[in-house]
Each structure stands twice: as C-alpha cells, then as structure tokens.
Amino acid sequence: MTSATAPASPGDVGTQANGTTSGTGSQPSRASRRGASGGRASGGRASGGRQAAPRRKKPPTAAGQLLQSTWLIVVVLVLWWVLSARSTNFFIPSLQQILEALGTDLTNGVIAGGALYSLSNLFVGLAIAVVLGVGLGLVLGEVGWLRRVVDPVIHFFRCIPQAALVPLIIGTFGIGQGPKMGTIAFACFWPILLNTIDGVLGVEPTVRHFSKVYRVPKPLYFRRVVLPAALPQIVAGVRVALPIGITVMVVSEMFASTEGLGFYILNSSATFQVPQTWAGALLVGVVGYLLSVLFVFAERRLLRWYYASGAK
Amino acid sequence: MTIQDSPAAATTHVMQVRGMSMSYGTGAAFNPILQDLDLDVVAGEFVSIVGPSGVGKTTLLRCLSGLLTPQAGTITVSGDEVHGPHPDLAVVFQDYSRSLMPWMTTRENVAFPLQGKGLGKAERNALADENLAAVGLAGQGDKYPWEMSGGMQQRVAIARALAYQAKVLLMDEPFASVDAQTRFDLEDLVLKLQHELGVTILLVTHDIDEALYLADKVVVIAEKPATVVDVIETGFGEDRDQLATKADPRFAEARARIMHRLKKD
Amino acid sequence: MNPTLSRPAWLLLARLGAVALILALWQTVVSAGLLPSMVPGIADVASAIVTSLSNPLFWGALGRTLLAALAGWMIATVVGVVLGLLIGSIRFLDRSTSILIDFGRSFPVLALMPVVIMLLGSTTTMEIVVVALSALWPVLVQTIYGARRQEAAVADTVAVFRIPAGLRFRRVLLPGAMPFIATGVRISSAISILVAVGVEVISQAPGIGRQITLMQQNQQWDVAFAYLFFTGLVGWGIAVGLQKIEDKLLTWKRQMND
C-alpha cells in the first residue's frame, strides 16, 4: 500500500487538499500532518499548543453572555433602521420597506415557491457530489499509484472558477432544473473529493495493519474502517462545498431561470422593485446562515465519537 | 512572618513584599493560594524561593512580576508600588521553547524588548550580541531558536532578560526541562553572570539542592495557603563548585533543615 | 502497486496518459453524438486555444478579470487581517462579533450583486466590491483563529517586557497568526477569481466571464471552452504560486512541527 508509506510530495493530492478543509477555520497546512502516520489531526481541528489562559475573572453569567453576543446585532439593526428611514436614495429603501416587502411575498407564496425550487436544486446537486466525491475519494485515497497519476487533472478541474461553467452547462443542456443540479454537483464535487482523499490518507497505519492482519474483507474494511475514520474530514469537505453550492445555485438562477430565489432577486431588480431586491438578497443570506447552523448541528451529532474521544 | 530586617534598612531593598495574599474563585470554589506573605530582596543578592510542587510558586512569581495583582498586600520594586510589570524586572520563564518567538532569530528575540524601550536598531543589535556572547552564544545571533537545543534556547532567554538591563531577574524553574548536565552548566553560568554583572536574582524552584547551591538566601514556602516558613542564609560565598559546595557540611545541614520544614505538614 | 511509478519520468508519462485518456473519452462522446451538437470536439477547442493566444481581446478580458479579482482580494486581505487581529486578541470583541461573523461568512455575497449594481452600476468598481465582500470572510475568520491562539508564554513575555501595543501587533500577534492567515488568504484567492468570473457571467461587467457568456450566446462554443480552459489554468497557477510563497514564508512553522 503506497498511501500510508509513500511520503507525499508537495504537489500530491493529499497534502494540498488541506487548503480546502479550511473553510470554517482550521489549522494551517501541514501542521501535524507531516510524517508517515498522518494522525487524526484531520477534520480541521488544530492540535497542540497551550492557548493563552483566560484572565482569571469571575465567569460571566448566562444572561451576561447572551447580552455580550447579541448587543452588536441589535445595534446594527437599530442603526440600519434609523439611518435607512431617512434615506432619500431610491436604491436604498428603509429597512421597514424591505421587511414589509419580505412579509408580503413570504405570505403570498411567491418566495416560498422560489425557495423550494432553489433548495431542491441545491440538495440534489450536493447529494450527487457527496456520493460521487466520497466514493471516488475512498478509491483514490486507497490506491496510491492511481492518485498520483490523476493528481494534476484533479487540481486543474478544482481550479476552474465554478461560475464560469454556468453559461456552458446551461447553454448546452437548457434552463431546466437538471442542468442547474449538475452544475451545483460539479462545483461541490471537488472539495468533497479532495477532503475524502485527505481523510483516507489520515487513517492510522495501526488500524490499517490490524485490518490486514485480521484479513478483514475489502467491502467491510471500506465500510467499517476507512469510511468512519475519514468521516470528520469528509464532513469538513461538505462544509466547504455547501457555500460554494449556494453561490452556484444563485448564479445559475440569475443567469437563466424563470424560478428560484436568484431569479426573484434579479427579476425584482430588473423591474425596479428595490425593496424586493434587497429582501431577496437578505433572504438568501438568512437561508445560507440557517443551513450552515443546521449543518453544524448535524455534524455534532454525526461525529459525536470524534469530539468525545478528544481527537479534536 | 519572618522578617529579621529592621524597617530602617528598607532603602537598600530592591524588592519588598508585605502581607501579600492571593486566592482564586469565590464561594464554594474559594481557593486560597498565598497567605500573608512577606519577602525582602537586597540589591545584588541571589534569593531562591523553594517549595513543593503545587504550593503556588508560579502564582507567587506571577504576582511578583506584575502579571497578576494580589488581593491583599503590597509589592514594591525600586521603591515603586507594583501594579503591573515593572521596567526594573525581567523574567526568565520555565517554558523557554514557547516564550521565545519562533519567527525571530535569536538576535531579534534578544533585541525585541529593547525595541519596546525605544532603542535604535544599531544599539539594540549591539546589546543583543553582547549579551548573547555573555551567555556563551557568540556568533549565533542569526540562528533561529528552533535550530538550537533546549539548553541553548534557555541561554537565549537569559540573554534576553540581561539585555533588558533590569535590576532584578525573576527566574521561574528555569532549568526544570533540561537534562542534568546542561542544568549544572546553566546554574554555573547564572552564578558567573550574577557575579560579573551584579544583578539581583530571584529564583523559584522545587529543587532544594539547586536552591541552596545558587542562593545567598533561601526562602522556604509551604503549607496551604502558602506562606514563608523559613529563611536560611547559606553563606557559601562567591566560589562555588558543583561537587565541593554540595559536599560542604553546611550544605547538608541546611538541606536537612529545609526538608524538615517541608515535611512537617 | 506499481513500483515503476516512483520514477519521475514514468510518473510524468502516466499522467500524460491519463490526460490523453480523458481527452479521447471526450472526443468519443462528442463524435458519437451522445452530447448536444454544440459541444465542440478536441481539435476545435485546441485551435481556439491557440487562436486566443494571439487575440488581444482575450488578453484584455482576462487582464480585467484578474485585476478586479486582485484588487478585491487585496482589500479583503488587509481589512480581514487588521480586523481579525483586533477581534481575535480582544475577548470582548470576539464574543460580540461571533454571530455577525458567522452570518457574514455563510452569506452568498453574489446574491447581493443586484443591489450593488443598483448602487454602483455594472462597473469594475462594483465587481471589486462584490469580490472584496466575498473574499473577506476566510481571511477574517482564519486571522481571528490565529490571534486567539497566542501562546500563554508569549503573552506573558510581551507583558513582562512591557512591549507597546503597536509593536506587539506587528511583531508578535501578526507573525504568530501568520500560518492561519496564509491559509485564509489562499482560500480567498480562489474565491476572488470565482466571484469575479461569477459577477461577469451574470452582469454586464467586462472580463473573461462576460466573454464566455458572449461566446456561448454567439454559438462560438469552441472559443467559450477555450476560455474556460484558461480560467482553470490561471486558477491553478495562482494556487500553486501561493503554496510556494507560503512554504517559503513560514519556514519557522514547518521546522517547529518537525
């Protein structure tokens, strides 16, 4: 098996993929990753290093903590409300108008239909990317020579700005839902693939040797050993892919569509419904935020063993 | 509790501590660490503070260096009451590998606090090289700390404290994480530097032999919360030797006295 | 398991073979008519690539995109690093801003583009603003991470030697956080190009993304694919270059980890 023992060259898939794990803040490239073992420092959780001791003060109460983490948001919203209320610029509506537009279109179903359309594109595209990315990543992670051969190809495709694909894919296959899902899937595929490979490379050599010695059958080995061990890294890859997917979702709908949240925003701006344009943009932001919060929750549940085992 | 000096002598004291108390937490979690602690350090003196592990030595040193503010009592350095790090104090930390900045060369590490003092570049570098030479690292200024052994890194940390030109050097278990031979070398280096430069040194350690070998005065702290239980003048003079001094009957006697002090609950 | 692959020459040959295989596959699929007829064959794309090389229009478009991406990226880097060091080193700010930053970084900024177009028009300035707003977050978040992780011993050292705030910021906080900042800067370089091209695809802002859309609408598919190829090449070049620079700048970090 070359994957565990071959020292990864700087251009190798495994090492470079580190950058992709870092969307939500992770350790710098290669820290604790060098050396043959690779360890389980993957998943973007930094290791080592004593952190600055918090100043020894009275621990703040729960109410105090809540206040501390929310006061700035309240200030921002109030400032926005007050300042925009006096705006004379046609293109900067008051926050009140924006919220009213949002309320109207939320209740009459205009937005709900668009959101359903957009989100179904996103989820199907992401699901395809996960299945293909993880499947191929497991294979490439295990088969060292194949990984080394296709390494430049993978990096080239990963570096194509995903938005540039939108006109070509939609131009070729039409403006239906399928091509949009395909574009999202293509864009999300690469970070998931690279992180999966990275995760497989990080599997403890001891675990690998154990499986060999006990002659664990290949399918069982993939399903019960490699997949769970690489899971933290795979999840990190999906976390990176999610915002890319949302961005491509919006671009694809703004490029050519008659439905969806991106279309709602573009259509509103084209017809000079300024508050609606702002409302749509804000709504996409809120949806993006909610999805990432939900994702973190799901991750905490899915990777409970990982956090509990102190591997972070 | 054990002050022999008369108040009149206070002017020669470079550092004085009176009635210092420190605790963490409140209510059920209340945890007193230091209780009513007094300490006097005369200019040019080498004082060791010795106590068992976990007695609160690091808390004491953090209070003395101004990193922590005690809840009661006063600390004066050069006649000023201390409310934060004092310019006449420098600290050599136990954790040398972390207290040196890995992105700076050893010369830059030594010169860095001088930049904070507002010295010009040429002057900073000259002082850095001079002090690196004093700790036996002449010509090694362009190396990075991580290119050096642990003992050499601790020499850099000592050079940094010396270059700062403080009157008092606080050392927190400075030789705890090096091997025995390096430790002896560093101890002798510190003794030599102290005699040459006349700097005052306050060293915190859990090692009784080290405390006795280096110091003019050993302050024993023990109990919970910690307080001063004994003060011993060693009287070994300037010429010390790792073998001869430690074989001195006075050494064994003082050692026994300290161990006795630390044992009785 | 293939021992010969450890030899560089064989590896290169195998890699070229893989590329050839993919191209052959594409050609077969196109020739067999499995894809819609507008998808060009290999030869057409290759000749379009060669023609583009001597086309000043192409170089101008690519240059505009890169300049916009670079400007937005640099603004994002400076703002992100300064804000990040401040927020990460002051606990009160850190706590107060955490929800806002979480919101900001999960916000698909391209959705805001129509709003920014209303305010600034379909101009390069608009493009730079959208790029900067998108690329800011990885730098900001990574810098906050780096600044938070100051070693206790370093913090004590800085306090004991009474290092003034400005010097501390420049010589301790910044280099200490540098490995994290580098990661953030690398991520946002990719985002900058992605967003710059994205803005051009869906607005009238000039650049290579706009050219791809125009070529596709003009049915010049071979040229559109050639341009796509160049965007990938540029993105790849930047990624490799930044990795090289990072390796050089952060020698101390790598040594420490060995």
Image: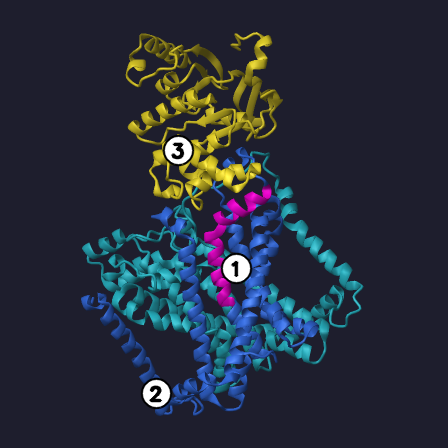
Chain colours: A cyan, B yellow, C blue
Residue neighbourhood size for the residue with mark 1, other residues' Cα within 10 Å, grouped as few (<14), some (14–19), many (≥20): many
Q: Which residue is drawn at 51% across and 87% down?
A: C216
Based on the picture, tell me whether residue C178 belongs to the magenta stretch: yes
Q: Residue at x 68, y 70 (%)?
A: A278
Q: Are marks 2 and 1 in contact (CB under 8 Å)?
A: no
Q: Mark 3 lies on which chain?
A: B
Question: Which of the numbered marks, if any, corresponds to residue A92?
Answer: none
Name the kind of residue labelled 1 in the image: Pro
How far across and how far down the image is residue C56, in percent?
A: 51, 84
C-alpha distance separating marks 3 and 1: 45 Å
Q: Quadrant of the N terminus of chain A?
A: bottom left
Q: Which of marks 3 and 1 is in front?
A: 3
- Residue that numbered label 3 is attached to: B133
C-alpha distance separating marks 2 and 1: 39 Å
The image quarter containing residue B258 is top left
How far across and how far down the image is residue C246, in percent?
A: 43, 58
Which residues fall within the magenta stretch? Answer: C165-191
As drawn, C226 above or below B245? below
Relative to C103, B263 lies left or right: left
Would you say residue B164 is visible in this rendering?
yes
- Residue that numbered label 1 is attached to: C138
Name the kind of residue labelled 3 in the image: Ala
- Residue that numbered label 2 is attached to: C27
Q: Which of C193 and A130 is in front in this view?
A: C193
Name the kind of residue labelled 2 in the image: Gln
Q: Which chain carries label 2?
A: C
User: Which is nearer the N-term, disc 2 or disc 1?
Assistant: 2
